[in-house]
Image (cartoon, coloured by chain):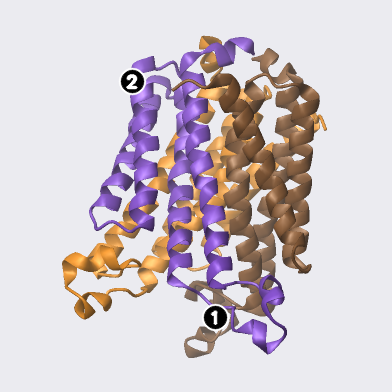
Chain colours: A orange, B purple, C brown
């Protein structure tokens, strides 16, 4: 057990995974921030403190800045879940430390840049390239894992 | 290998994670239940047994109780994915058993309460507090992990 | 560490999990393909290369084939996340190899069939049965895990 976390690749994975997941969790806070400052809610009980009855209902609406954060959040889920699953198994498969670090660093950098490009927003292809950089890293770990440890 | 699951923190994490993930899976069943009892579908092939042609198309619609379950389900995904990723790595980092149990218990309790508060619904801030309790637990594990095992 | 990946159940889990996660990642590519070929975008910056100003805004729309892929993708997330979490912990709990392989194979087969049934689409109950097959496998692993290793 102590041995497991003495493994440098697993320690590095734990650090980068925790950073990128914390970044993903920040999207919840950003959504809540825009919902409250712009008074844009999805549930009647959420806007009860802004008015009663018909007066509150007008806040049950959608807003482009809220939807943008929500799309960025969903894109994070769609890409960080594969990184967590494949990345952990890849880390346990005994890869070279420097190769593993390169994968983790590009992925985390790409996802942070993806969020910046989505929220500002930056013109394309900024967001597209950030997406494909992260996507490619995960596929590269998947390929490495299946080549070394395939057992079907 | 046997050693790994003899570790009490990891056994506790496995138990709590399995419970909270099973709870999340229940949301799929709840969505299907509301879709069928209220005849509210997203795909033409799903309502083929309720009528033919134009008659079936009227069931391609949205409904507030279905959308509410779907929002609760997505919120679960957004919060339980970080718990699974960070919680597993935290469990492997050798935390104190009673501290770890406290984290797992608050998280699972908060997410169960969050679902109840979302589906009934309970007035705010019930759901908001449940969200932040779970969110805080995950951030606390992330902080503990990065403080002890940072390797970048 | 070397021992961990010499474990056949964990190697099998790593292989099947990597395959099913790669399949899920394919949904991102499918969404991008339909968005570009059908010129259906969610963000103004994405359609800037198809026209300027008002001319570009007409591509900010939804399309049934894009929405169908997105629903299939979200359903994957909702079901593959539980498989990854529970499946990994189940694999570490020392199950019988042939029982574990049976679980992994049915799950991966069911999710691949689910995607085919969703995208073609096939008439119900094809997609419904594929969904419940995968759902049942995950619940069976959850039950096995809680029965053997419950620690609350």
Residue B135 lies, with reference to residue A6, above or below; the image says: below
Q: Are marks 2 and 1 in contact (CB under 8 Å)?
A: no
Q: In which quadrant of the rendered view does residue C62 lie? A: bottom right
Residue under the point 59% across and 84% down:
B58
To which residue does mark 1 refer?
A: C61
Q: Give the crowd class for mark 1: few <14, some 14-19, many >=20 residues within 10 Å.
A: few
Q: In which quadrant of the rendered view does residue A59 lie? A: bottom left
- Residue C41 % position (x, y): 56, 75
- Residue B62 % position (x, y): 50, 74
To which residue does mark 2 refer?
A: B99
- Residue B9 % position (x, y): 46, 18
Q: Would residue B65 be found to the left or right of residue B32 on screen?
A: left
- Frontmost of labels 2 and 1 is 2
Chain ID at mark 2: B
- Residue B144 % position (x, y): 35, 25
Query: Which quadrant is home to the N terminus of chain C?
Result: top right
Residue under the point 63% across and 49% down:
A135
């Amino acid at each position: 057990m102590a041995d497991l976390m003495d493994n440098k690749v697993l320690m590095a994975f734990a650090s980068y995974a925790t950073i990128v997941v914390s970044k993903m969790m920040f999207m919840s806070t950003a959504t809540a921030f825009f919902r409250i400052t712009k008074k844009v809610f999805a549930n009647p009980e959420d806007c009860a403190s802004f008015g009663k009855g018909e007066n509150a209902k007008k806040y049950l609406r959608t807003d482009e800045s809220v939807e943008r954060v929500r799309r960025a959040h969903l894109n994070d889920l769609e890409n960080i879940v594969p990184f967590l699953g494949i990345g952990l198994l890849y880390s346990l498969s005994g890869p070279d430390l420097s190769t593993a670090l390169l994968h983790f660093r590009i992925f985390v950098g790409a996802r942070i840049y993806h969020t910046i490009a989505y929220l500002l927003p930056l013109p394309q292809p900024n967001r597209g390239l950030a997406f494909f950089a992260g996507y490619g890293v995960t596929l590269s770990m998947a390929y490495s894992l299946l080549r070394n440890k395939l057992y079907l």
